[in-house]
Image (spheres, grey):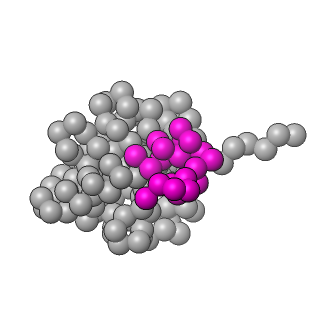
Amino acid sequence: MIAAPPAAPLLARGVCRALDQLGYASLAEFPLANGRRADVIGLARSGELIIIEIKSSVADFRADRKWPDYKHYADRLYFAVPQEFPAHLIPEDCGLIVADGFGAAILRHGVSLSLAAARRRAVTLRFAHAAAVRLRRHLDPDAAGRPPDGIF
């Protein structure tokens, strides 16, 4: 018997596909300046930043109480959950996304938090740097993040 793939990575894939269709660039497993890690962050052409916290089950949702810390790094905070998740558990001020491994739908946007300009710049620069590093590692996985001998 083949084991089913973990639910959270499949939900992240569906969320990223949906964000792409909405015009957002997205990164999964994004490190924040406060030491936390956002499951998915999206950056719109307008500069709007959204964070999506993925909860694959009720137990996962109840066990995790660090998600309020993410509100300081985005204009909106969303939860992405599977179809069978009881939506009434998601706080009203947060957005709600239903996702699977192939896509996602936004059911509720939640409250706009509007970042301060300095925080927006810092998060956007962190996003750009993380994206560039990931692209370089994808294009040259043998480089391991260091320049070849004789350069620099």
Left or right relative to 2: residue 119 = left
Q: In which quarter of the image is the C terminus?
A: bottom left
Q: Which of 144 and 97 is in front in this view?
A: 144
Quarter in which the N terminus is drawn: top right
Report x, y in % for residue 37: 44, 62
Q: Where is residue 36 in the image (x, y as percent from the top left)?
A: 42, 68
Query: Residue reaching furthest front?
Result: 150
Position of residue 35 relative to residue 70, above or below, is below
Q: Hey, which residue is sitting farthest left in the picture? A: 117
Q: Which of 85 and 29 is in front in this view?
A: 29
Instruction: Using residue 128 as the reference point, say whether residue 14 is left or right of it.
Output: right
User: Relative to 151, is 72 above or below?
Assistant: below
Q: Position of residue 35 (x, y in %)?
A: 41, 71
Any magenta on residue 139? yes
Q: Residue 65, can we see it?
A: yes
- What stretch of residues is rendered in magenta? 131-152
Residue 58 sits in quarter: bottom right
Q: Can residue 52 be seen in this view?
A: no
> How many callouts does the rendering have?
0
Residue beneath the point at 27% across and 54% down? 125
At a point 19% along the width and 62% down the height, the residue shown is 119
Residue appearing at x 53%, y 46% in the figure: 137
Residue 105 or residue 26, whichever sits in front: 26
54 falls in the magenta region: no
Residue 43, x across and y down, in percent: 29, 44
Q: In which quarter of the image is residue 122?
A: bottom left
Q: Determine the residue located farthest toward the top in the rendered image.
A: 21
Q: At 26% from the left edge and 52% from the top edge, which residue is drawn?
A: 124
